[in-house]
């Protein structure tokens, strides 16, 4: 993750901003997701978090949003986030890179147009984290051969079809 090599002061500043924006919402969000408890509260929290992040993106704070998402530690599988906006386009794009000791799995050019898309991206990271956790409990050999399709199998097909063009052919050309 990007802040592994940061100075203590820079880490403290990120932590201060993180707490100011989200307080304990992320910890609660992760617990609700993990135990599939109280879907209404989960949706309320994730809507709030996604709104904050989307407003920061609209104000062109790309790197700050990347740092915040990475700081959330949404997945047991380490990940990096890269957000960008191509010139003359109104939407944002995200590259997610998940990695373990064996390999890196990347999802590139995920399109974010709305708060709902940010919400789905957060859910995607949570989903991949849960999937990785399940795989790691079954067999360590499986970890060497995991692929990007296996990690998102079962996630929201509409989001994959509309926002993850890189994967669309594999899932929808069959």
Image (cartoon, rainbow, N blue to C red):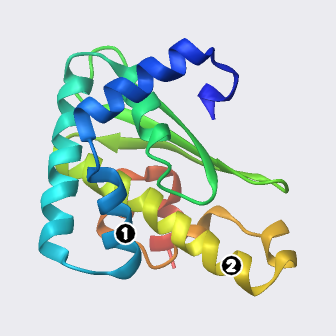
- Residues 32 and 80: in front is 32
Q: Position of residue 74 (x, y in %)?
A: 47, 54
The dot on residue 135 is: 2
* Residue at 31% in and 34% down: 19
Q: Which residue is mark 1?
A: 31
Q: Position of residue 30 (x, y in %)?
A: 38, 63
Q: In the image, is residue 118 above or below residue 144? A: above
* Residue at 34% in and 14% down: 87
Secondary structure state at the residue bearing disc 1: helix
Mark sitting earlier along the chain (2/1): 1
Q: Does 7 sit left or right of 93 as displayed?
A: right
Q: Does 132 sit left or right of 155 as displayed?
A: right
Residues packed near mark 2 inside 10 Å, few (<14), some (14 to 19) or many (20 plus):
some
Q: Is residue 143 visible?
A: yes
* Residue at 19% in and 35% down: 52
Instruction: Report, in whole angstroms, how far the alpha carbon at label 2 lies from the one at label 1.
Output: 19 Å
């Amino acid at each position: 993750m990007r802040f592994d090599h940061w100075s203590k002061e820079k880490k403290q500043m990120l932590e201060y901003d993180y707490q100011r924006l989200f307080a304990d919402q992320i910890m609660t969000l992760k617990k609700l997701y993990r135990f599939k408890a109280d879907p209404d509260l989960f949706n309320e929290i994730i809507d709030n978090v996604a709104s904050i992040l989307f407003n920061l993106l609209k104000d062109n704070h790309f790197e700050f949003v990347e740092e915040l998402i990475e700081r959330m530690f949404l997945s047991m599988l380490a990940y990096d986030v890269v957000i960008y906006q191509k010139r003359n386009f109104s939407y944002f794009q995200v590259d997610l890179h998940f990695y373990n000791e064996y390999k890196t799995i990347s999802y590139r050019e995920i399109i974010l147009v709305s708060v709902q898309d940010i919400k789905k991206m957060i859910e995607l990271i949570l989903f991949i984290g849960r999937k990785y956790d399940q795989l790691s409990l079954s067999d360590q050999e499986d970890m060497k051969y995991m692929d990007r399709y296996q990690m998102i199998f079962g996630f929201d097909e509409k989001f994959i079809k509309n926002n993850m063009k890189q994967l669309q052919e594999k899932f929808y050309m069959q």
